[in-house]
Image: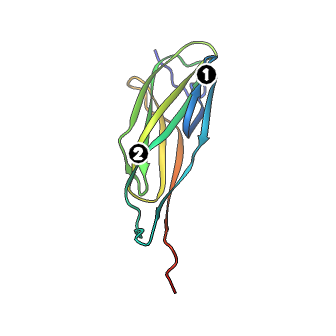
């Protein structure tokens, strides 16, 4: 039976957005270029005042979990939230937590449609079989900034 007592585990060790994750043969992982802000630019005299929607497809979420006393099958759900509280489709991954001081490393490539500036939040939940509730482990932010770059007007 899966356990989800917040005092006995499992515990979140890390949840970050990065450009890529290296998973070496010896089991060591490295998060490369940790990102919490992206700037979208438009250049030229006709650069729009408002940001044009775009797709972010070069982000990876790295989530590491340590078992402590927890065992069994669980899930990790990542629920993105756009500025203004608009919830985007969630990503889910099943995990099995083994006994001992072990852990689970989840490497989740993300594809995120961006249609406005502001803070996008990624809620990370631990899920389990009913009747266990979902447990919010953390929230990870990604700030989107739009920067139109127009040349100065000729004098």
Residue found 59% across the figure and 18% down from its top: 69
User: Where is mark 1, residue-wise?
Assistant: 24
Please state the horizontal and vertical placement of residue 51, each as a whole percent of the image.
Answer: 41, 62
Q: Say few, some or many: other residues with alpha carbon within 10 Å of mark 2 (under 14 / 14 to 19 / 20 or more).
A: some
Q: Say few, some or many: other residues with alpha carbon within 10 Å of mark 1 (under 14 / 14 to 19 / 20 or more).
A: few
Report the front residue among 2 and 55. 55
Element marked by disc 2: strand
Above or below, 136 against 99 in this view is below
Horizontal side of residue 77 vs 23, given as left or right: left
Residue found 57% across the figure and 45% down from its top: 35
Which callout, 1 or 2, points to the residue nearer the camera? 1
Report the front residue among 29 and 96. 29
Q: Earlier in the sequence, mark 1 or mark 2?
A: 1
Q: How many marks on residues?
A: 2
Above or below, 146 against 58 in this view is below
> Real-space Cα distance between discs 1 and 2?
27 Å
Please state the horizontal and vertical placement of residue 146, each as a whole percent of the image.
Answer: 48, 62
User: Where is mark 2, residue-wise?
Assistant: 112
């Amino acid at each position: 039976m899966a356990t989800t007592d917040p005092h006995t585990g499992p515990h979140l060790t890390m949840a970050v957005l990065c450009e890529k994750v290296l998973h070496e043969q010896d089991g060591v992982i490295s998060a490369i270029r940790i990102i919490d802000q992206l700037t979208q630019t438009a250049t030229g005299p006709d650069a729009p005042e408002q940001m044009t929607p775009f797709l972010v497809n070069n982000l990876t979420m790295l989530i590491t979990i340590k078992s402590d006393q927890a065992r069994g099958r669980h899930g990790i759900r990542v629920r993105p939230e756009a500025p203004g509280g608009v919830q985007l489709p969630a990503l889910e991954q099943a995990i099995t937590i083994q006994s001992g001081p072990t852990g689970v490393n989840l490497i989740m490539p993300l594809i995120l449609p961006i249609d406005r500036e502001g803070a996008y939040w990624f809620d990370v939940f631990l899920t389990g079989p009913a009747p266990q509730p979902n447990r919010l482990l953390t929230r990870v932010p990604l700030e989107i900034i739009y920067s139109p770059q127009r040349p100065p007007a000729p004098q």
